[in-house]
Amino acid sequence: MDSFYKVLTEKQHELAENNEYNFDHPDAFDFELLAETLQKLKECKKVEVPVYNFVTHSRESRTKTMYGANVIIFEGILTFYNAKVLKMLDMKIFVDTDSDIRLARRLKRDISIRGRDLEGVLKQYQKYVKPAFEYYILPSMVHADIIIPRGGENTVAISLVVQHVHTQLQLRGFKLREQLAHSYCGQPLPDNLYPLPSTPQVKGLHTFIRNMDTPRDEFIFYSKRLIRLTIEYALSLLPFKQVTVETPQGINYSGKRLSSTKICGVSILRAGETMEQAVCDVCKDIRIGKILIQTNFDTGEPELFYLRLPKDIKDYRVILMDATVATGAAAMMAIRVLLDHEVKEENIMIVSLLMAEIGIHSIAYAFPQVKIVTSAVDPEINEKFYVMPGIGNFGDRYFGTEPSLEQ
């Protein structure tokens, strides 16, 4: 909530410099911007959160980009004060602690982090902080669903909160990566899947890249050929319009042309980067974005680490590229990021060399308007989330980073 302090006037700046401005009064917060930001996060949209500088008492020019999530934790002293904000909260927790500890924490924070002196902090505490707690914050406790005494030391209460959150996620249909792997067994493949026709040439290319004995240079060569075919097939699924052109012989020819030239490629690093060249070869002057998503080894879930997208990507049709799709967890996160940047779901196409059935079902269930394009579909994944029979770790084989047998 500290991010949403109002921009101070010149007079208010002077008061703040002398510890005479009340930062604990509701009027100090921009509740309108706060409510708007929370609402966007609840709708799983990207937001730019202000960064407030407590040394200069002003908002910095930079902002912090945040994305919608399954769980959003919002914290602040006046969280329960504003009725509009209060209505958005699914679980309201009041964390209480001893007044002496509150004062000690404030002294430590304001002196070491916010550059204030002891006298100024105590003056502000007695004049504004303590009265605000008694008048605004303490009475708001009646709105809390859960009251946790002793703050972070109360591990029993915190564990109960965590268990409740997990229960609510499961009731609302949230599935962990392991659960995705067993959700769609035996179901027919979805209508928004567009597999590359399995011609003898395509089968032959797959034979090369699936063979564990294929040398790296040949693996790269045949992978590039298959990627090119898959990208060309994906482009054929884009909307075309009827056009008439005149041939050099002066005769009209009735043909087709892409309805829009605004096409953007986005690769999911690192394996998806291997597909960029094929897109650039067949789409003149195409813009390329990148998303780095890696698996958290503690939770087994994908996490966003890096993002670079064109600013006006919402106006484009996006070809999202990843070499292989197993559970679909990383692809779904990437699609969610694109939606957060206001790309329309029907304008997104996920293209991959190889997909597992469960990954296809997961993506199709979550995003039924996204086109799914692949050169082959394999039936299952193993306990390490590799596609079976698969092609191994595509990135390691392509970039030559496979561990040696000695290791």
Image (cartoon, grey):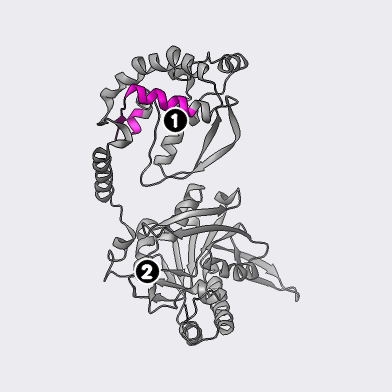
The quadrant in which residue 332 appears is bottom left
* Above or below, comparing residue 28 to residue 311 in the picture: above
Q: Disc 1 or 2, which lies upstream in sequence?
A: 1
Residue 174 x, y percent position in the rendering: 30, 52
Kindly identify which numbered label has been placed on residue 1.
Answer: 1
- Which of 308 and 146 lies nearest the eye of the viewer? 146
Residue 56 x, y percent position in the rendering: 60, 26
The quadrant in which residue 215 appears is bottom right
Extent of the magenta region: 86-109
Which residue is label 2 attached to?
A: 385
Q: Residue at x 26, y 51 (%)?
A: 170
Q: Is residue 148 magenta?
A: no
The quadrant in which residue 327 appears is bottom left
Local packing at callout 1 (Cα closer than 10 Å; few below 14, some 14-19, many 20+) is some
- Which of 269 and 249 lies nearest the eye of the viewer? 269
Q: Secondary structure at mark 2?
A: loop
The amino acid type of the residue labelled 2 equals: Phe
Q: Residue at x 56, y 38 (%)?
A: 63
Local packing at callout 2 (Cα closer than 10 Å; few below 14, some 14-19, many 20+) is some
**260 left or right of 323?**
right
* CA gap, disc 1 and disc 2: 39 Å
The amino acid type of the residue labelled 1 equals: Met
Q: Secondary structure at mark 1?
A: loop
Q: Are marks 1 and 2 in contact (CB under 8 Å)?
A: no
Q: Quadrant of the N terminus?
A: top left
